[in-house]
Amino acid sequence: MHDLNDLLYFARVVEHGGFAPAGRALGVPKSTLSRRIALLEERLGSRLLQRSSRHFGMTEIGETFYRHCLAMVAEAEAALEAVENNHAEPRGTLQVTCPISLMLSQVASMVSRFMAAYPLVTVHLSATNRRVDVIEEGVDVALRVRFPPLENEGLVMKRLAESRQLLVASPVLLNRILHPQSPPDLSRLPGLDLTRSTPKHVWTLQNAGGDVVDIDFEPRYAADDMFALRQAAVDGIGVAQLPDYIVAEQVGSGSLVVVLPKWMLPVGVIHAVFASRRGLSPAVRSFVDFLASEFRNWIGP
């Protein structure tokens, strides 16, 4: 087994362009570095460096060896950082984004509880319905609600909860026009929907037997805010597909009723995305873990 310190020494000698500057950076005598690299070459049976009074460089096999040494050093540093971060108290500023409806209904109170538990963390929360570029915009954690299949953006994703969808309407509207008995009946009712990037609006319903029906419709009212759609539904303007956490109170009070309760809508996924697990700060890790616990308590066992 090779002494892994020799691989570190070799990487630093190449990085600093010679034994003397590498020795100063490492706090190791130049003669020691030279002897260790020479012994390494002897054990490997290959010359790694070309060195003379006028030239210092790597051989072809030395270049290949150097790339692997760099990877080893990076992994070792990441391992040490992970242990250090695990013991460090969360602190610093978190840049967080969240859809408006999810923030107002659930996440705002969760963030407050997180900050009470971690007094050294500052949170900058941006409520937005647009798709945020986590890398380009320097966002630490972006909360999202999407329907499967979820896109692979090269980001780390943590599933937090499911977002069950309901088709709801005011009983006044249904008494005035029609109580739907089957999905095709929906075409006779005015629809409400979120503003889409494409002109197509559709309700996709599935029954317990696995039958799937798509109902295309032209919304009478389209908005980019779920609370606006909920209010319109309560006021009898039309039928809306909304998450259960948005309409639970209204369904409970009877101001909204579930339309076609035996037919299910696609289930969304509430999740957090962030750039990388490597080098993840204690603040980010604690925040994501805290949200996961909060959403488990919200959904229940």
Image (cartoon, grey):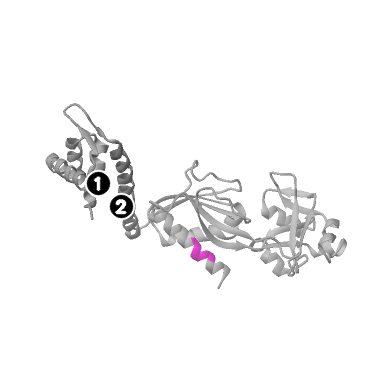
Task: Examine the residues drawn in magenta and state their main secondary structure.
Answer: helix
User: Can residue 183 be seen at all in this image of the molecule?
Assistant: yes
Image: 9 above or below 110: above
Question: Which three-letter amino acid code belongs to the residue tagged 1?
Answer: Leu
Residue 251: quadrant of the picture: bottom right
Please name the residue shown 30% across and 46% down the image.
Answer: 69
Please name the residue shown 75% across and 56% down the image.
Answer: 203
Question: Which three-letter amino acid code belongs to the residue tagged 2?
Answer: Ala
Mark 2 surroundings within 10 Å by alpha-carbon count, few (fewer than 14), some (14 through 19), many (20 or more): few
Mark 1 surroundings within 10 Å by alpha-carbon count, few (fewer than 14), some (14 through 19), many (20 or more): some
Left or right of 87? Residue 242 is right
- The count of marks equals 2
Q: CA distance from mark 1 to mark 2?
A: 10 Å
Element marked by disc 2:
helix
Q: Which residue is mark 1?
A: 8
Residue 35: quadrant of the picture: top left
Between residue 44 and residue 195, name the one nearer to us.
44
Left or right of 26? Residue 219 is right
Q: Please provide percent x and percent y for residue 291.
A: 50, 61
Between residue 35 and residue 258, name the one nearer to us.
35
Image: 95 above or below 54: below
Q: Are marks 1 and 2 in contact (CB under 8 Å)?
A: yes
User: Which residue reaches farthest bottom?
Assistant: 301
Q: Is residue 196 magenta?
A: no
Q: Which residue is mark 2?
A: 76
Left or right of 268? Residue 275 is left
Q: Which residues are magenta?
A: 291-295
